[in-house]
Image: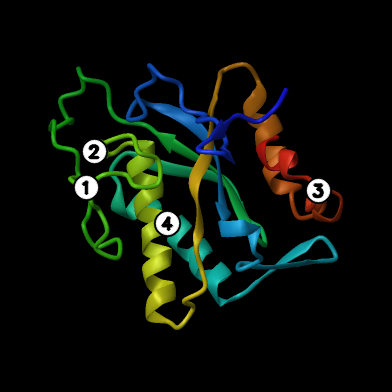
Amino acid sequence: MTTPKFKGKYRIESTRLPNHDYTANGWYFLTICTKDRLHHFGQVISGQMELTEIGEIAQKFWLEIPNHFAHIHIDAYVIMPNHIHGIIVIDKPSPDNHIETGIDVETRNFASLQQQKTMDKSNKFGPLKSGSLQAIIHSYKSAITRWCRQNNHDNFAWQPRFYEHIIRADGSLDRIRKYIINNPVKWEQDKNNTHNLWM
């Protein structure tokens, strides 16, 4: 099977399910990579991740995601030298729960980057849906990029797209958690195999 081309260049097919609502409740396994897979976040030494300054910011901002998006939780995650693996949980109250106000509460101080009325330039899916997985990752990536520009890390950049996998109720959650946790230990054998980034 060959990788399809667009305008003469190889491209990665979108992993988005065409009819899936990415604001819907669910567990999502994500992989976000740096541009050209450069090692901006640190290095693995003896199976342990040693974070750079950018890596520490990437970790800090990841942990802060639930502070800026309503009904969002984070589960297992790992910051690797050139990518991030993590599980994000969307868990909105059911419609018959009267605590639900009908207002999607998102703070606008996540580096002031909740750009819901702009186009998602990284994925070309049109306007970002408030509270969607794409909006969360777009804001996270933008916050780190802005921090880097403000702190003289001008060479930092992200790969435009991100990989996402909807975790089903089929027992795969534990397997994915184990994969994330063991990523640093397996770095030496996996670091040159880009297929292993996607499990």
Residue beneath label 2, please? 127
Residue at numbered disc 3: 190
| Structural distance between the alpha carbons of marks 3 and 2 | 36 Å
Residue picked out by circle 1: 118
Which secondary structure lies at badge 1? loop
Q: Quadrant of residue 147?
A: bottom left
Q: Earlier in the sequence, mark 3 or mark 1?
A: 1
Q: Nearer the viewer, residue 60 or 135?
A: 135
Amino acid residing under circle 1: Thr
In this rendering, the answer to whether 58 lies above or below 194 is below
Residue at 80% over, 54% down = 187
The C terminus: image quadrant: top right
* Amino acid identity at mark 4: Lys
Q: Which mark is residue 141?
A: 4
Please tell me which of labels 2 and 1 falls first in the chain.
1
Does the residue at mark 2 contact the one at mark 1 (Cβ under 8 Å)? yes
Residue 100, horizontal then vertical, whole percent: 18, 30
Q: Residues within 10 Å of mark 3 (few under 14, many from 20)?
A: some
Disc 2 residue type?
Pro
Observer-side mark, 1 or 4, equals: 1
Left or right: residue 69 versus residue 163 is left
Q: Real-space Cα distance between discs 4 and 2?
A: 17 Å
**Is disc 3 in contact with disc 2, using a CB cutoff of under 8 Å?**
no
